[in-house]
Protein backbone atom coordinates (compact mmCIF):
# COMPACT_ATOMS: atom_id res chain seq x y z
CA UNK A 1 0.00 0.00 0.00
CA UNK A 2 1.46 3.33 -1.09
CA UNK A 3 1.84 6.02 1.55
CA UNK A 4 0.76 9.55 0.68
CA UNK A 5 2.90 12.25 2.29
CA UNK A 6 0.46 15.11 2.65
CA UNK A 7 1.85 18.45 3.71
CA UNK A 8 -0.65 20.90 2.23
CA UNK A 9 -4.32 21.24 1.33
CA UNK A 10 -3.52 19.99 -2.17
CA UNK A 11 -3.56 16.24 -2.63
CA UNK A 12 -0.19 15.21 -4.13
CA UNK A 13 -1.76 12.80 -6.61
CA UNK A 14 -5.01 12.80 -8.53
CA UNK A 15 -7.15 9.98 -7.23
CA UNK A 16 -9.88 8.69 -9.56
CA UNK A 17 -13.46 9.30 -8.44
CA UNK A 18 -12.36 11.23 -5.34
CA UNK A 19 -12.04 14.74 -3.95
CA UNK A 20 -9.85 15.13 -0.87
CA UNK A 21 -8.40 18.12 0.94
CA UNK A 22 -5.93 17.79 3.79
CA UNK A 23 -4.85 20.47 6.29
CA UNK A 24 -2.10 18.90 8.45
CA UNK A 25 -1.68 21.98 10.67
CA UNK A 26 -5.33 23.01 10.95
CA UNK A 27 -4.75 23.46 14.69
CA UNK A 28 -1.50 24.33 16.40
CA UNK A 29 -0.05 21.69 18.70
CA UNK A 30 -1.13 23.69 21.75
CA UNK A 31 -4.68 24.15 20.43
CA UNK A 32 -4.93 20.46 19.53
CA UNK A 33 -3.69 19.45 23.00
CA UNK A 34 -6.40 21.58 24.60
CA UNK A 35 -9.17 20.18 22.38
CA UNK A 36 -8.06 16.61 22.92
CA UNK A 37 -8.08 16.95 26.71
CA UNK A 38 -11.42 18.78 26.82
CA UNK A 39 -13.18 16.34 24.50
CA UNK A 40 -11.65 13.33 26.24
CA UNK A 41 -12.86 14.56 29.62
CA UNK A 42 -16.29 15.90 28.66
CA UNK A 43 -17.60 13.55 25.98
CA UNK A 44 -20.09 10.92 27.23
CA UNK A 45 -18.30 8.05 25.50
CA UNK A 46 -20.23 4.81 24.98
CA UNK A 47 -19.23 1.28 24.01
CA UNK A 48 -21.87 0.35 21.46
CA UNK A 49 -22.69 -3.25 20.61
CA UNK A 50 -22.28 -4.62 17.09
CA UNK A 51 -23.63 -7.89 15.76
CA UNK A 52 -21.33 -10.18 13.75
CA UNK A 53 -22.70 -13.49 12.47
CA UNK A 54 -25.48 -13.34 15.03
CA UNK A 55 -23.23 -12.63 18.02
CA UNK A 56 -22.89 -9.32 19.83
CA UNK A 57 -19.52 -7.71 20.51
CA UNK A 58 -18.36 -4.37 21.83
CA UNK A 59 -17.51 -2.02 19.00
CA UNK A 60 -13.67 -1.67 18.94
CA UNK A 61 -13.74 2.01 19.94
CA UNK A 62 -15.91 4.37 21.99
CA UNK A 63 -18.33 6.75 20.27
CA UNK A 64 -20.67 9.69 20.79
CA UNK A 65 -23.08 11.38 18.38
CA UNK A 66 -24.10 15.04 18.58
CA UNK A 67 -26.51 16.74 16.19
CA UNK A 68 -28.49 19.94 15.74
CA UNK A 69 -31.74 18.03 15.24
CA UNK A 70 -32.54 15.24 17.65
CA UNK A 71 -33.13 12.55 15.03
CA UNK A 72 -31.52 9.14 15.04
CA UNK A 73 -28.67 8.12 12.73
CA UNK A 74 -28.09 4.54 11.59
CA UNK A 75 -24.76 3.18 10.36
CA UNK A 76 -23.24 -0.33 10.42
CA UNK A 77 -26.55 -1.68 11.78
CA UNK A 78 -26.32 0.68 14.77
CA UNK A 79 -28.97 3.30 15.48
CA UNK A 80 -27.72 6.21 17.58
CA UNK A 81 -29.77 8.94 19.20
CA UNK A 82 -27.80 12.19 19.21
CA UNK A 83 -27.00 14.56 22.01
CA UNK A 84 -27.08 18.33 21.49
CA UNK A 85 -24.11 20.24 20.13
CA UNK A 86 -21.82 21.58 22.84
CA UNK A 87 -20.02 24.95 22.75
CA UNK A 88 -16.67 23.30 21.99
CA UNK A 89 -18.15 21.33 19.07
CA UNK A 90 -19.68 24.53 17.72
CA UNK A 91 -16.28 26.24 17.95
CA UNK A 92 -14.65 23.44 15.97
CA UNK A 93 -17.42 23.57 13.36
CA UNK A 94 -17.03 27.33 12.92
CA UNK A 95 -13.31 26.88 12.30
CA UNK A 96 -13.98 24.19 9.68
CA UNK A 97 -16.28 26.64 7.92
CA UNK A 98 -13.32 28.99 7.40
CA UNK A 99 -11.91 26.54 4.81
CA UNK A 100 -15.01 24.61 3.70
CA UNK A 101 -18.50 25.84 2.79
CA UNK A 102 -20.36 22.52 3.11
CA UNK A 103 -23.32 22.23 5.45
CA UNK A 104 -22.87 20.19 8.64
CA UNK A 105 -25.46 19.45 11.32
CA UNK A 106 -24.00 16.42 13.11
CA UNK A 107 -20.70 15.04 14.35
CA UNK A 108 -19.73 11.49 15.22
CA UNK A 109 -16.87 11.30 17.73
CA UNK A 110 -14.65 8.23 18.01
CA UNK A 111 -12.19 7.45 20.79
CA UNK A 112 -9.48 4.97 19.82
CA UNK A 113 -8.10 4.04 23.23
CA UNK A 114 -5.12 2.00 22.00
CA UNK A 115 -3.79 0.22 18.95
CA UNK A 116 -6.39 -2.55 19.09
CA UNK A 117 -9.24 -0.07 18.67
CA UNK A 118 -10.08 0.26 15.01
CA UNK A 119 -12.67 1.03 12.33
CA UNK A 120 -12.96 -1.55 9.53
CA UNK A 121 -13.35 -0.98 5.81
CA UNK A 122 -16.44 1.10 5.08
CA UNK A 123 -17.82 4.08 3.18
CA UNK A 124 -19.85 6.93 4.64
CA UNK A 125 -22.73 6.27 2.25
CA UNK A 126 -25.77 5.92 4.48
CA UNK A 127 -29.00 7.27 2.97
CA UNK A 128 -29.20 9.91 5.73
CA UNK A 129 -26.05 11.53 4.27
CA UNK A 130 -27.48 12.22 0.82
CA UNK A 131 -26.09 11.50 -2.65
CA UNK A 132 -22.53 12.90 -2.49
CA UNK A 133 -21.81 13.62 1.18
CA UNK A 134 -18.99 15.81 2.42
CA UNK A 135 -17.22 14.48 5.53
CA UNK A 136 -14.87 16.71 7.54
CA UNK A 137 -12.58 14.71 9.83
CA UNK A 138 -10.57 16.24 12.70
CA UNK A 139 -7.78 14.12 14.26
CA UNK A 140 -6.51 14.72 17.79
CA UNK A 141 -4.00 12.75 19.81
CA UNK A 142 -1.99 9.77 18.56
CA UNK A 143 -1.26 9.72 14.84
CA UNK A 144 -2.98 6.80 13.12
CA UNK A 145 -2.86 5.50 9.57
CA UNK A 146 -5.93 6.14 7.43
CA UNK A 147 -6.21 3.55 4.64
CA UNK A 148 -8.00 4.08 1.33
CA UNK A 149 -8.84 1.60 -1.41
CA UNK A 150 -10.86 1.91 -4.60
CA UNK A 151 -13.81 -0.45 -4.88
CA UNK A 152 -12.98 -1.57 -8.45
CA UNK A 153 -9.45 -0.41 -9.32
CA UNK A 154 -7.56 -2.79 -7.05
CA UNK A 155 -4.19 -1.09 -7.62
CA UNK A 156 -5.54 2.13 -6.12
CA UNK A 157 -4.61 1.70 -2.44
CA UNK A 158 -3.11 4.39 -0.21
CA UNK A 159 -2.47 5.23 3.42
CA UNK A 160 -2.15 8.59 5.13
CA UNK A 161 -0.74 9.24 8.60
CA UNK A 162 -3.19 11.73 10.10
CA UNK A 163 -1.45 14.34 12.24
CA UNK A 164 -2.51 15.63 15.65
CA UNK A 165 -4.65 18.70 14.92
CA UNK A 166 -5.22 17.91 11.24
CA UNK A 167 -8.35 18.21 9.09
CA UNK A 168 -9.19 15.81 6.24
CA UNK A 169 -12.17 16.54 3.98
CA UNK A 170 -13.71 13.94 1.67
CA UNK A 171 -16.26 15.14 -0.87
CA UNK A 172 -17.85 14.61 -4.28
CA UNK A 173 -18.54 11.04 -5.44
CA UNK A 174 -15.81 9.57 -3.25
CA UNK A 175 -18.06 7.53 -0.93
CA UNK A 176 -19.49 5.66 -3.94
CA UNK A 177 -16.08 4.55 -5.20
CA UNK A 178 -13.71 4.31 -2.21
CA UNK A 179 -13.57 2.51 1.13
CA UNK A 180 -11.54 3.66 4.12
CA UNK A 181 -10.45 2.29 7.49
CA UNK A 182 -8.39 2.86 10.62
CA UNK A 183 -6.63 -0.51 11.06
CA UNK A 184 -5.41 -2.11 14.24
CA UNK A 185 -1.75 -1.90 15.18
CA UNK A 186 0.35 -3.97 17.58
CA UNK A 187 2.54 -0.97 18.42
CA UNK A 188 2.12 0.50 21.92
CA UNK A 189 0.42 3.82 21.18
CA UNK A 190 -1.62 6.44 23.00
CA UNK A 191 -5.28 7.25 22.37
CA UNK A 192 -6.76 9.25 19.49
CA UNK A 193 -9.98 11.23 19.16
CA UNK A 194 -11.57 11.63 15.74
CA UNK A 195 -14.49 13.93 14.94
CA UNK A 196 -16.33 13.38 11.66
CA UNK A 197 -18.70 16.21 10.81
CA UNK A 198 -21.50 15.41 8.38
CA UNK A 199 -24.88 16.66 7.21
CA UNK A 200 -27.81 14.41 8.09
CA UNK A 201 -30.90 14.67 5.89
CA UNK A 202 -34.11 12.94 6.93
Image (cartoon, rainbow, N blue to C red):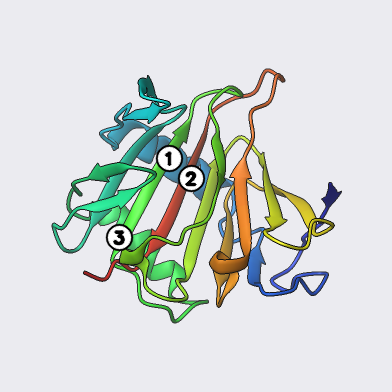
Is disc 1 in contact with disc 2, using a CB cutoff of under 8 Å?
Answer: yes
Q: Residue at x 34, y 55 (%)?
A: 107
Report whether 166 appears left or right of 128.
right
Where does residue 195 sit, x and y in percent of width and height? 44, 50
Nearer-N-terminus badge (1/2): 1
Q: Is residue 79 above or below residue 12?
A: above
Mark 1–mark 2 Cα distance, whole angstroms, equals 5 Å
Disc 3, SS? strand
Q: Where residue 98 is drawn, which disc sits there?
A: none
Report whether 33 appears left or right of 97.
right
Q: Where residue 194 is drawn, which disc sits there?
A: 2
Is disc 3 in contact with disc 1, using a CB cutoff of under 8 Å?
Answer: no
In depth, the one of 48 and 4 nearer the eye is 48
Disc 2, SS? strand
In depth, the one of 60 and 66 nearer the eye is 60
Q: Residue at x 42, y 26 (%)?
A: 53
In depth, the one of 7 and 81 nearer the eye is 81
Q: How crowded is mark 2: few (under 14 residues within 10 Å), some or many (20 or more)?
A: many
Mark 2–mark 3 Cα distance, whole angstroms, equals 14 Å
The part of the image, by quadrant, that contains residue 168 is bottom right
Q: Quadrant of the C terminus?
A: bottom left
- Residue 116 visible in the picture: yes
Q: Residues within 10 Å of mark 3 (few under 14, many from 20)?
A: many
Q: Where residue 110 is drawn, which disc sits there?
A: 1
Mark 3–mark 1 Cα distance, whole angstroms, equals 13 Å
Residue carrying label 3 = 106
Q: Residues within 10 Å of mark 1 (few under 14, many from 20)?
A: many
Where does residue 163 sit, x and y in percent of width and height? 66, 48
Where does residue 141 sit, x and y in percent of width and height? 56, 37
Where does residue 7 sit, x and y in percent of width and height? 77, 62
Nearer-N-terminus badge (2/3): 3
Q: Which residue is drawn at 64% across and 35% down?
A: 183
Amino acid sequence: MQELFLESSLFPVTLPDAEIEYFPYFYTSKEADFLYQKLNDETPWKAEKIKVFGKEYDQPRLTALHAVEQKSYTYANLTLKPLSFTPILNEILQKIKTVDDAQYNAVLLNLYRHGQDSNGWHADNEKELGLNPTIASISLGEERYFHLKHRRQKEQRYKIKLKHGSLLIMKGPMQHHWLHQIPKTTKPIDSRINLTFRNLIH
